[in-house]
Each structure stands twice: as structure tokens, then as C-alpha cells.
Image: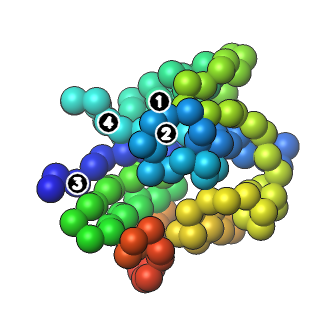
């Protein structure tokens, strides 16, 4: 099985992240979880082009100088994904409705401590919040449960 290539951005404003509560897509492995904004590469895109396009499509916002923070490798059995992880503090435009779920500005502490998110997401969010330098993180899941994380 070919690995998936994706991007994810945590857009920041006044101590908050713009989060997507995934509720609208059929057969969504992220159903009812809260995530940053992102998605799959289109043919020929760079990571920067992909994240700017995905954010525009899902939120209506235009990112200005998104910062590549890390590379996250996910695995669960035969499934593998490589995700380019970004943060962005500068953007323009107005939020639009998202066809994948509800967009909401959420306090960073609430994201970390209260929202249902993937267990491994807490690891990379903590790294980003501590201003860690560029990192490579491997998150190994088994039946959607985190069994191992390796930071390089």
C-alpha cells in the first residue's frame, strides 16, 4: 500500500488554534475528532503549495508565511502517512463554512486537555508550543491506539 502524503496547519490567533471538528464526511477515520487544517497533496504540489491550497479550500483564509515545524510519520499496520506539519500566525480573509465539519477558534489549553484529538497529536502540539526546532516524529498506532512514539 502506497503511503499517504499530507499537510496539516495549526493556525494561531490570540492563544487559540483554528480547529476543525470533523463531523460531515462519510466513512471519515477522523470522525468526531478535532484537527488542525490540512489534507492530501495533489499531483506535483510542494508541501507549501498543498497547505496553502488546503487552508484556502477548507477555511477561506489565505496563509501568509506558514512555518514548516516538523515531519510526522504515522503507521497503523499496513497504513502509512507522511505529514508535513505547519503553524501560521499570519493570514487574511474571512472564515467560510467547511464541508468537512465545524471550524472553531479554541484556546490552546482546551485543545490539549479537553478536546477529543488523536493521542499522538498531543505530542507534536506540545513540541510546537515549546518552540522546539524542526523535528521528525514517528507515531505508531495499532487499531487506532498509540503504541509507540519516536522523536528524531
SS of the residue at dot 4?
loop
Q: Position of residue 112 (x, y in %)?
A: 73, 64
**Comes first in the chain, label 4 or label 1:** 4
Per the model, the C-alpha gap separating discs 3 and 1 is 19 Å
Q: Give the number of the disc on residue 41.
A: 4
Which residue is tagged 2? 38
The first of marks 3 and 4 along the sequence is: 3
The colouring scheme, among rainbow, by chain, secondary structure or one colour, is: rainbow
Image-based side of 132 in relation to 89, left or right: left
Q: Nearer the viewer, residue 17 or 142?
A: 142
Residue 34: give x, y in percent of width and height: 63, 50
Q: Secondary structure at mark 1?
A: helix
Eyeballing the image, is 70 above or below 65?
A: below
Look at the numbered discs 2 and 3 and tell me whether their residues touch, using CB distance below 8 Å: no
* Earlier-in-chain disc, 3 versus 1: 3
Quadrant (top left/top right/bottom left/bottom right) for the N terminus: bottom left
CB atoms at circles 2 and 1 under 8 Å apart? Answer: yes
The Cα–Cα distance between marks 2 and 1, rounded to whole angstroms, is: 5 Å
User: In the rendered image, which residue does mark 3 sit on?
Assistant: 3
Q: Circle 1 is placed at which residue position?
A: 54
Q: Quadrant of residue 18?
A: top right
Q: Identify the mark nearer the N-term, 2 or 1.
A: 2
Q: Is residue 99 visible?
A: yes
Q: CA distance from mark 3 to mark 4?
A: 12 Å
Amino acid at each position: 500500500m502506497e503511503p499517504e502524503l499530507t499537510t496539516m496547519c495549526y493556525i494561531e490567533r490570540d492563544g487559540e488554534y483554528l480547529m476543525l471538528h470533523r463531523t460531515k464526511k462519510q466513512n471519515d477515520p477522523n470522525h468526531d475528532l478535532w484537527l488542525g487544517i490540512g489534507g492530501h497533496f495533489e499531483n506535483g504540489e510542494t508541501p507549501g503549495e498543498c497547505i496553502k491550497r488546503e487552508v484556502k479550500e477548507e477555511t477561506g483564509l489565505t496563509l501568509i508565511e506558514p512555518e514548516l515545524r516538523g515531519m510526522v510519520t504515522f503507521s497503523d499496520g499496513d497504513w502509512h502517512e507522511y505529514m508535513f506539519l505547519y503553524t501560521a500566525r499570519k493570514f487574511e480573509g474571512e472564515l467560510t463554512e467547511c464541508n468537512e465539519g465545524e471550524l472553531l477558534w479554541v484556546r490552546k489549553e482546551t485543545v490539549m486537555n479537553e478536546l477529543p484529538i488523536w493521542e499522538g497529536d498531543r505530542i507534536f502540539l506540545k513540541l510546537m508550543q515549546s518552540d522546539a526546532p524542526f523535528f521528525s516524529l514517528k507515531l505508531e498506532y495499532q487499531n487506532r491506539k498509540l503504541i509507540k512514539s519516536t522523536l528524531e
